[in-house]
Image: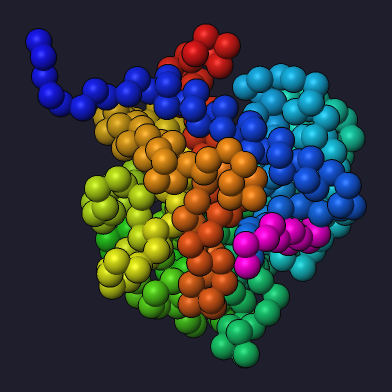
Amino acid sequence: SCSNAPQEEPLAKVIDRGLKASTEQALLMAKELEQQDGRLPKSIKDGKLETSDCYWWCSGFFPGELWYLYENNPTPELKKYAGLFTERLEKVQHVTDNHDVGFMLYCSYGNGYRLTQNPAYKDVLVTGAGSLSTRFNPMIKAIRSWDFTNNGKWQYPVIIDNMMNLELLTWASKTTGDNRFHDIAVTHANTTMENHFRDDYSCYHVVSYDTITGKPHIKMTHQGYADESAWARGQAWAVYGYTACFRETNDSIFLNFAKDIADMIMDRVKTDDAIPYWDYDAPVTKETPRDVSAASVTASAMIELSTMVPDGQKYLDYAEKILKSLSSDAYLAKVGDNQGFILMHSVGSLPNGSEIDTPLNYADYYYLEALKRFMDLKGINYKDI
């Protein structure tokens, strides 16, 4: 048959291209930062690599990327850099002034411990879980995300992103046998389920709780288009968070909730390549930026979700579509470009004029996690590709 239809590229080739480019980019970045004491990659600003210290909320993603790359292809070089950059975060275990300790430590030390069983890594994670737990208020039944009050507008702000920090607590509970960590995580997930979501399963970015009544007094956005809009990355944090909650608790309430959020995402994202605009409700013009980080997080979550439900194939197909898009020239950087970041076209905080249409290390991290999950699911070994 001589059909003129474009040949579908086999997925193994897509994965191979993504992993090869990712490995080369990550090593370029690691070598660039090796001599910069304690620095970690953040983004690109004015054409230059922007770095952070260990206290920036994204500090754990680059070490986590290196661990995922090492897991695929266990070279001494990748292991050396994964360890080097992970250990730059050691002080984070004592951070009690924000909720991002989960991101910072679980992505870096968590993957490092999973792959090496280094007992020093375990100690950092358990201490970090204790630090995160100090932010839980039993009357409000949630972990406080931020200490700042947005000029007095908020009393006790909780953001949907906080769902991503619960895995550190459930891990710590299993590791230490201390159920308090698990109970805090489940309580926070239930409170968020009750107060953060609209009838269509889209979610608010910020809910602030009244510190006297414990009830929400304001629901709004800080990084989205409007208070009632569906900020793209917020929807991704939600589907990922509740999928992980089901894995950790086996409570079908969380599974059904994750499915409803996933269905909402598939229904609302109208772009041909499944990479959402930065907010589902933002007016679309030629200039409206996409948010690749939201797509990466969604793909990783949906691959896992697909294994948990009878009709999981639709979630896997959707994740596969995202991975093909992310691994295409439209989003995957050429090796040597993009200051060593893997993917292009993410958005940090558009309303605050920060990180618009730029690479972000969490887009890269969840892209690699999604590739790994897909390979595990399909039984694809990197060596066989």
Q: Is residue 228 left or right of residue 3?
A: right
Of 209 and 92, which appears nearest the observer? Answer: 92
Residue 239 can be seen, yes or no: no
226 shown above or below 51:
below
Whole-percent x, y for residue 173 in the image:
71, 40
Q: Is residue 374 above or below residue 223?
A: above
Give the x, y percent position of residue 38: 86, 53
What color scheme is it? rainbow
Q: Is 246 in the magenta?
A: no
Q: Magenta includes 48?
A: yes
The residue located at (53%, 40%) in the rendering is: 334
Q: Position of residue 69 (x, y in %)?
A: 65, 29
Residue in the image at 47% along x and 55% along y: 345
Q: Quadrant of residue 145?
A: bottom right
Residue 336 in view (yes/no): yes
- Label count reads 0
Magenta residues span: 46-57
Q: Position of residue 341 (x, y in %)?
A: 61, 47
Residue at 67%, 60% (x, y): give it.
48
> What residue is shown at x 79% (from left), y 40% (from top)?
31
Q: Quadrant of the N terminus?
A: top left
Residue nearest the observer in this picture, 24 or 135: 24
